[in-house]
Image (cartoon, grey):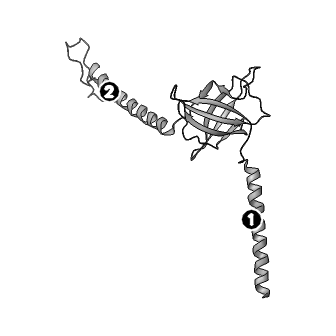
Amino acid sequence: MKRSVVETVLGAVVLIVAGFFLVFSYNTANVKSVSGYEVTADFSGIGGLAVGDDVEVSGVKIGSITNVSLNPENYLARVHMSIDPSIKLPDDTAALISSQSLLGGRYLSLEPGSSEETLPPGGHIQYTQAPQNLEQLLGQFIFSMQKGKDDNAAEGEAGTAKKPARSMALPTGPKTDAPETDDSETY
């Protein structure tokens, strides 16, 4: 009987400590949703940006993505975000989709401009930049390297066709009147 009471108390302590760490990690990870005013932005591609991803200014979370949809008028991806009401963004703010690391994970980075006017609730961010596609960039790099090699090879072939080959043959022509020397004499 003593043993089961000790095991029960020890199990309860483990569960309390686990709960404490869960609450602590939730508060420090900044994963809670931000409720505030909504702002939209249109992108030519969102590259994996999803509902719930962070909206940051200078690396500080100020909001989260609330909805991603297709704008039927211009066929661009429309991103809806909720911004903390204490943050007033200038109306010339730029929105960029960035990667958290090479392994993935996206967030929306806002770069405030210098305008005196602020974005109203329900406002629209004009200046946007879609994320860089790593596979596309790598393909372009490899293609450009291959093209450079092909161009160099073609230049080398064209260069040999244009320039006559140099020979090491001695010139032939009339003999000169230079005196012949006898190298066989010894001193």
Q: Does residue 131 appear in this view?
A: no
Quarter that holds the C terminus:
top left
Using the image, tell me which numbered label, if any, was put on residue 154.
2
Find the distance from the CA under tag 2 to the CA under tag 1. 68 Å
Quarter that holds the N terminus:
bottom right
* Residue 154 or residue 146, whichever sits in front: 146
Name the secondary structure under disc 2. helix
Q: Which residue is mark 1?
A: 18
- Residue 121 % position (x, y): 72, 29
* Residue 175 or residue 179, whichever sits in front: 175
- Residue 8 % position (x, y): 76, 78
Please rate how many residues cluster around mark 2, counting C-alpha atoms within 10 Å: few if below 14, some from 14 to 19, many from 20. Answer: few
Disc 2 or disc 1, which is closer to the eye? 1
Using the image, tell me which numbered label, if any, was put on residue 53.
none
- Residue 21 % position (x, y): 76, 60
Instruction: Name which residue type carries label 2.
Output: Ala
Q: Quadrant of residue 181?
A: top left
Looking at the rendered structure, the number of numbered marks drawn on it comes to 2
Q: Is residue 172 left or right of residue 129?
A: left
Q: Quadrant of residue 106?
A: top right
